[in-house]
Image (cartoon, rainbow, N blue to C red):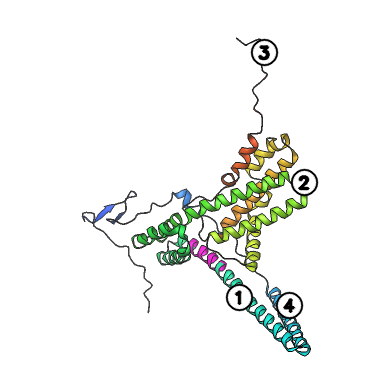
């Protein structure tokens, strides 16, 4: 029978030489790692989690299960009939057809296994983000340690995080509070990934801006923006530990679009867009260049939503990327083209006193 009585915190004597006082007045063992809690106003705004992946209704699941089963049976019967016809025509043709059918079955099994593994990994990352938010809210040390260990296992295959993993593993036993452990894990493991993700989004936004500004066809713009968006979401998911396949990308893209719809990001009515359009910069430049800047801003907003969806930890210790962080190059490049108003120049030969 488990004891539900909460444990009392460990007591320390202030005259003990092995005890020191932290900056916030707490008594901690000498050599322990002390994580300073966030200010009160920051704790009130623990990053909100992105919306959960959209779930298909039971009737929808039944429909797709029945359709998939019928298509699979039909394809299997068609292949079987083809192999029988090949054997009826010639034995060697039948064996060749049978070899092709076995190769197709083996490849299909491998693809389905990869898709299933990708879906499981995405579900694991979403579950870790929810557990981390719960550990932050309840200051649960055991849950925070479980989240940290799973993230260390996921990051074990990433060479860029070797130093961060080593430092974090050495501090696991020294952190007492669960919320502090989540914040330390975020600073150690997510900081380098966030910097690389921000750079990926910024580069994608610049490419979209340039291509749509010089492209002569609207269809080319649409195709390029779509391909860039899909590739950006895939690279961000792989950066944070996800391995989405085709089905995983469909699920992930639906989650990103849902997040944009919830946060109102597709309107892109942020201060940067208002700065471009409101100040008349896009109007003073060519219409194509203005369209390129707006498309770049929309791509940047999509990338920010993808970061929040694919990141396995909520933004608590580190600031969430803003549109100005990933799209500042578009604005700077546009504003440099705007001539500065220096007033009328004096005619030559009549210098002003």
Question: Element at badge 4?
Answer: helix
Question: Element at badge 2?
Answer: loop
Say which of 305 and 19 sits in front. Answer: 305
Q: Quadrant of residue 172?
A: bottom left
Q: Tell me how far mark 4 sits from mark 2, CA to CA.
A: 42 Å
Residue at numbered disc 2 = 216
Question: Element at badge 1?
Answer: helix
Residue at numbered disc 1 = 110
Q: Which comes before the other along the chain, label 1 or label 2?
A: 1
Residue at numbered disc 4 = 67
Which quadrant, please, contains the C terminus? top right
Given contact means CB atoms under 8 Å apart, are the residues at marks 4 and 3 in contact?
no
Q: Which comes before the other along the chain, label 4 or label 2?
A: 4
Question: Element at badge 3?
Answer: loop
Residue stretch in magenta: 122-133
Residue at numbered disc 3 = 348
Q: Which comes before the other along the chain, label 2 or label 3?
A: 2
Q: Which comes before the other along the chain, label 4 or label 3?
A: 4
Report if residue 23 is visible in the image.
yes
């Amino acid at each position: 029978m488990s004891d539900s009585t909460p444990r009392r915190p460990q007591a320390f004597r202030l005259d003990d030489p092995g005890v020191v006082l932290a900056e916030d007045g707490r008594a901690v063992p000498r050599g322990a790692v002390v994580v300073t809690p966030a200010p009160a106003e920051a704790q009130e705004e623990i990053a909100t989690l992105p919306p959960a992946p959209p779930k298909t209704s039971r009737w929808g699941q039944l429909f797709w299960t029945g359709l998939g089963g019928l298509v699979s049976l039909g394809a299997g019967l068609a292949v079987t009939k083809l192999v029988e016809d090949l054997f009826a025509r010639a034995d060697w043709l039948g064996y060749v057809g049978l070899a092709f059918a076995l190769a197709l079955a083996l490849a299909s099994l491998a693809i389905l296994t990869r898709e299933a593994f990708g879906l499981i990994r995405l579900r694991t990352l979403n579950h870790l983000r929810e557990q981390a938010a719960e550990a932050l809210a309840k200051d649960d040390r055991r849950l925070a340690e479980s989240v940290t260990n799973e993230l260390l296992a996921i990051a074990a295959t990433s060479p860029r995080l070797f130093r961060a993993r080593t430092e974090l593993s050495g501090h696991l036993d020294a952190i007492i509070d669960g919320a502090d452990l989540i914040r330390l894990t975020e600073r150690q493991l997510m900081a380098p990934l966030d910097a690389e993700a921000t750079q990926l989004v910024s580069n994608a936004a610049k490419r979209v801006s340039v291509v749509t500004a010089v492209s002569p066809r609207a269809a080319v713009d649409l195709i390029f923006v779509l391909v860039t968006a899909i590739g950006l979401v895939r690279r961000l998911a792989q950066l944070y530990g996800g391995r989405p396949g085709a089905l995983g990308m469909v699920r992930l893209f639906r989650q990103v679009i849902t997040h944009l719809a919830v946060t109102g990001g597709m309107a892109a009515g942020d201060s940067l867009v208002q700065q471009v359009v409101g100040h008349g910069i896009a109007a003073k430049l060519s219409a194509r260049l203005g369209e390129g800047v707006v498309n770049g801003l929309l791509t940047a907003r999509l990338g920010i939503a993808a970061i929040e969806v694919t990141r396995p930890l909520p933004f608590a210790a580190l600031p969430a990327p803003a549109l100005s962080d990933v799209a500042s190059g578009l604005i700077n490049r546009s504003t440099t083209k705007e001539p500065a108003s220096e007033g009328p120049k004096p005619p030559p030969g009549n210098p002003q006193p």
